[in-house]
Amino acid sequence: MKIKTGILSALIATIVLSLIMVMKAKMGVMPQLNAIAMLAGMMGTPLIMGWVAHFVIGTLVWGILFAFLVDKLPGSTMTSALIFSVLAWLMMMLGPMPMAGAGLFGMKIGIMAPVATLVLHLIWGFVLGFSFNKLSH
């Protein structure tokens, strides 16, 4: 049951994150920071596959992992989700960002890349924790 809750909570969080990412793009905010295009480019696939990868990672990978770790991370579910989101952000900064050519922490894009992505991950973590709490009761 906890895995199902983790996946559904992560799906909700990923939808919220995705809506913010689309709004960011529509407003022209940091157009050079496009995680979906980066994912698609790394895979050598059309943009739609970047979205698919984004949802698979954000929903299945992180949702299942959070379900297993929520009771092992310190603090409440909300605290655990925020800690987990920072760990997910850190993995993105050390793996996919450099692999996409943006450098460690996306510094080739500029100082706002790590700041913006951290804020987005914290929003994702907040929604993850909130949803997990609501769906668990």
Image (cartoon, rainbow, N blue to C red):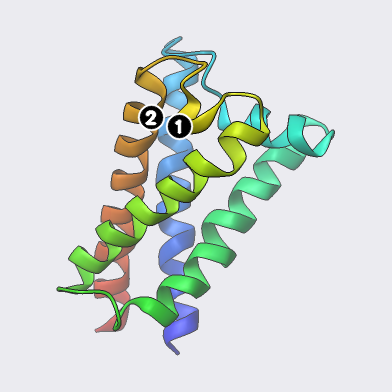
User: Of the residues shown, which amino acid type is indicated by label 2?
Assistant: Pro
Q: At which x and y percent is residue 61?
A: 57, 65
Specify the quadrant of the image occupied by residue 112.
top left
64 to 60, vertically: above or below: below
Q: CA distance from mark 2 to mark 1?
A: 6 Å
Circle 2 — which element? helix
Q: At which x and y percent is residue 50?
A: 70, 39
Q: At which x and y percent is residue 29?
A: 41, 13
Q: At which x and y percent is residue 47?
A: 74, 31
Q: Residues within 10 Å of mark 2 (few under 14, many from 20)?
A: many
What is the quadrant of the C terminus in the image?
bottom left
Whether pointer 2 and pointer 1 mark residues with C-beta atoms closer than 8 Å, the reply is yes
Circle nearer the N terminus (2, 1) = 1
Residue 105: mark in rendering = 1
User: Residue placed at 34% from the left, 61% from the top?
Assistant: 84
Q: Is residue 112 left or right of residue 39?
A: left
83 to 95, vertically: above or below: below
User: Residue placed at 61% from the left, 46% from the top?
Assistant: 54
User: Residue placed at 32% from the left, 71% from the top?
Assistant: 132
Q: Which residue is mark 2?
A: 114
Circle 1 — which element? helix
Q: Is residue 83 left or right of residue 67?
A: left
Specify the quadrant of the image occupied by residue 10.
bottom left
Considering every residue shown, the one lying at the far bottom of the view is 1
> Which is more toward the observer, 28 or 64?
64
